[in-house]
Amino acid sequence: MSLQNKILSKELSDKFWKEGLTLATAESCTAGNIAAVITAIPGSSHFYKGGIVAYSDEVKMNLLGVNPEILEKHGAVSEEVVIEMVKGAMKSMNSDCAVATSGIAGPTGGTPDKPVGTVWIAAAMHDKVITMKANGDEGRKKNIENATLYALQMLQKLFQNQENEQ
């Protein structure tokens, strides 16, 4: 785990404790790495409900409620799919917040439209969902680490937006 991910995870842990909110994860290309970073912080069991590693489209549909038509039309690595994944994680685990990732970690699997290193990430807090697309192939391990960092940063952004609205 990178130092940056560890520091951010600790900051988020403090925020989840303070706000009394819960978190769930739905991970495809990060394969549980976000969950591992979050649960590396002692006390995470007070807010982290769990995660689903949805590597296959079947799991995305059956456990996260991703619409098969959206998968067919946009592909698993798309904004539309991660939005459904993040909402499905919140619903299936009855959580206040969630993050979801779907992408191509590499070294193979890329296409001209979606090259290796393409990752879609969604983060949600209650009914607010934000998304981002990450690009750039720095190798499988670094692609996963970067996607994890971006997901944590997006959760932090949701907390900041909530504080600014109050």
Image (spheres, helix red, strand yellow):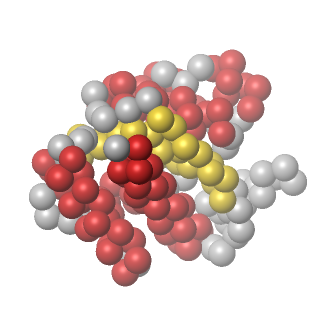
Give the quarter of the figure containing the C terminus.
top left
| x and y, in percent, of residue 53 in the image | 42, 43
Q: Is residue 90 above or below residue 35?
A: above
Query: How many numbered marks have been drawn onto this rendered protein structure?
Result: 0
Q: Can residue 52 be seen by looking at this rendering?
A: no
Q: Nearer the viewer, residue 160 or 13?
A: 160
**Outermost residue, bottom side:** 3
Question: Is residue 5 rendered to the left or right of residue 54?
Answer: left
Q: Can residue 131 be seen by looking at this rendering?
A: yes
Residue drawn 46% across the image and 55% down it:
157
| x and y, in percent, of residue 47 in the image | 19, 46
Residue drawn 66% across the image and 75% down it:
138
| x and y, in percent, of residue 55 in the image | 52, 42
Q: Is residue 123 above or below residue 157?
A: above
Residue drawn 70% across the image and 70% down it:
137
Question: Is residue 67 rendered to the left or right of residue 127?
Answer: right
Question: Is residue 30 rendered to the left or right of residue 133?
Answer: left
Give the quarter of the figure containing the N terminus.
bottom left
Q: Nearer the viewer, residue 18 or 5?
A: 18
Q: Quadrant of residue 88?
A: top left
**Outermost residue, right side:** 112
Residue drawn 21% across the image and 61% down it:
14
Q: Nearer the viewer, residue 73 or 125?
A: 125
| x and y, in percent, of residue 80 in the image | 65, 33
Q: Nearer the viewer, residue 21 or 86?
A: 21
